[in-house]
Image (spheres, rainbow, N blue to C red):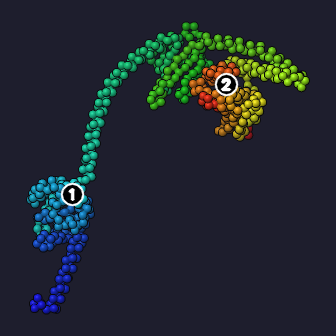
Amino acid sequence: MTDKYSNTELEALVAGLRQQLQEATDTIDAIRTGAIDAFVVNDGNGPQLYTLKSADQTYRVFIETMNESAITLNSEGLIVYCNTGFSEVMQMPLSKLIGAHFTDFIKTEQKSLFEEILSDAWDADDKGEIILVRNDGTQVPFLFSLTTLELDEGIALSIILTDLSLQKENERQLLQKNEELEAAKAFTDQLNDELEEKVKERTKELLVSREHFRFLADHIPVIAWTAQPDGQVSYFNKRWYEYTGMEQHPGSEKNWIDALHEDDVQHTLEAWNKALTTGETYQVEYRFKRAEDDTYRWHFGNAVPYRNEEGQIVSWFGISTDIDYQKKEMEKKDEFISMVSHELKTPVTSLKGFTQLLMAILKGNSEPVVSEYLGTMNNQINKLTRLISDLLDATRFNGGQLQFDVETFAFNKLATEICSEMQLTTNKHLIQLQLDKDVFIRGDRNRIGQVMINLISNAIKYSPSADRVLVHTKAENGRVDFCVKDFGIGISKLEQPKLYTRFFRAAENTHDNTFPGMGLGLYISMAIVAKHDGTMRVESELNQGSSFCFTLPVVDTE
């Protein structure tokens, strides 16, 4: 070889080869990076260069930036070009894709089918769906479109591939949803059929129930009625029309107020509106005019709400019972009590006076047992005096004759005085008083003090095993609270609504029915507080003690 070429010639040859190698390397890099429009494929016969006829940079930029994958195959099915989109989808570098046989990436079951499509595509454009397999084994569905492409080196096939993964997943989900929808529709149709049958059965039951209700309502000796949730009366039984003489026709239920005594209209409507607002039981006394003799007779109205499963009121059911006879008998009893109380007041006052006189005369000059007996007599006379006063107050309130001496006074000062006085009546209980800021009340000071005494006296009476009673005041938002808490027998939830009824005693239903009293204290207290535009409330649990409070409006003294 040295005989043929000189050293100088060999060096020049090597330099030329190096330059060609560098140029080839640069060309390959430029092709792969998209710097020039050409393709180099090694097909076994050496590197082959492919270029696009009339290609320019704009076309290449378009191919590289399009969302779809683009590849070009030669007549042997080798990939002579692919854009970066195809590289990203297949998760392989361009160097591994260009020069590879395209069928190597096709799912095995579809290779023969694609070969037939590929063979036909040289003569005419074609399209279809195909599944390609990545190196990791995952399968990607594609929509492909084949068309011939004229290159300088001959005809090639251009394939545009659109990733159908999202579309196929959407189709799968849509199909699943359609199947679920069909199943739901079938289930709904079944439920609807069952519901229609139940509605038919329920309608028959309701018709029977309605007729039963009407039959019973029309044959009971009291007035029965129903009302809608907004308070509009929707039904009266036969007794109503017989009693009032009103004609029964659509809409006649609205005229029920016409049968009321004019003096009872306001408080009746107030009680009804309160029940509609709060959902509480409606209870009120009023007078209806009886058609047969044009006289007004007292009735007790009572109605309860009927609620659905959500707790919403859907109807009201009420009755009105003639209590005129009982009312007149109660008035006679009140007159008798009032008369007896007045008759008892004089001798009891005399007894108290003589007892106190004896206590003064014998003070320090008699045996201790005599002073003790006189003290006991005085205490019992005081209790009897309070009972007589309660009886008189109860009858006066019931007859609307309870008198009030109105003045403006400091609330905390009154509370302090009452607690001090009540502490003298008990050696066992410590009355603990906690006062909020002082406010002024406009009302009857003695009557308000009477309410305080009743609450504290009850707390002491009904907590025989306790040693303290808590009293506190709280002033806010233009009102003041006075609360008394004990730790005694408590009151059941069932009995609490009856607490302010005349002659009701909470201890009557307990095993230890040894608490003195006539059950008038809370009844009178409620009446006094109501006359002062106040309210009363109770919180109690059986055997856990009770807390009684009343609230009054305050006045501005500035």
N-term mark: 2 or 1:
1
Give whichever of 166, 64 is nearer the camera. 166
Q: Is residue 141 above or below residue 489?
A: below
Q: How many callouts does the rendering have?
A: 2
Label 2 crowd (10 A; few <14 / some 14-19 / many >=20)? many
**Labels 2, 1: front one:** 1
Say which quadrant the C terminus sits in: top right
Residue under circle 2?
522
* Residue appearing at x 73%, y 20% in the figure: 387
Query: Residue 187 sits in which quadrant?
Result: top left
Q: Is residue 269 left or right of residue 488?
A: left
* Residue appearing at x 21%, y 62% in the figure: 70
Secondary structure type for disc 2: helix
What type is the residue that disc 2 sits on? Leu
Say which quadrant the N terminus sits in: bottom left
Is any part of residue 124 visible from this angle?
A: no
Q: Is residue 215 left or right of residue 4?
A: right
Residue 362 position in % (x across, y down): 89, 22
Residue under circle 1?
133
Residue 201 position in % (x across, y down): 34, 21
* Residue appearing at x 19%, y 55% in the figure: 131
Give whichever of 525, 360 is nearer the camera. 360
What type is the residue that disc 1 sits on? Val
Secondary structure type for disc 1: strand
Residue 394 position in % (x across, y down): 69, 19
Query: Residue 410 sits in which quadrant?
Result: top right
Residue 50 position in % (x across, y down): 15, 70
Query: Residue 188 sits in which quadrant?
Result: top left
Label 1 crowd (10 A; few <14 / some 14-19 / many >=20)? some
Is any part of residue 476 visible from this angle?
A: yes
Give whichever of 168, 367 is nearer the camera. 367
* Residue appearing at x 87%, y 20% in the figure: 358
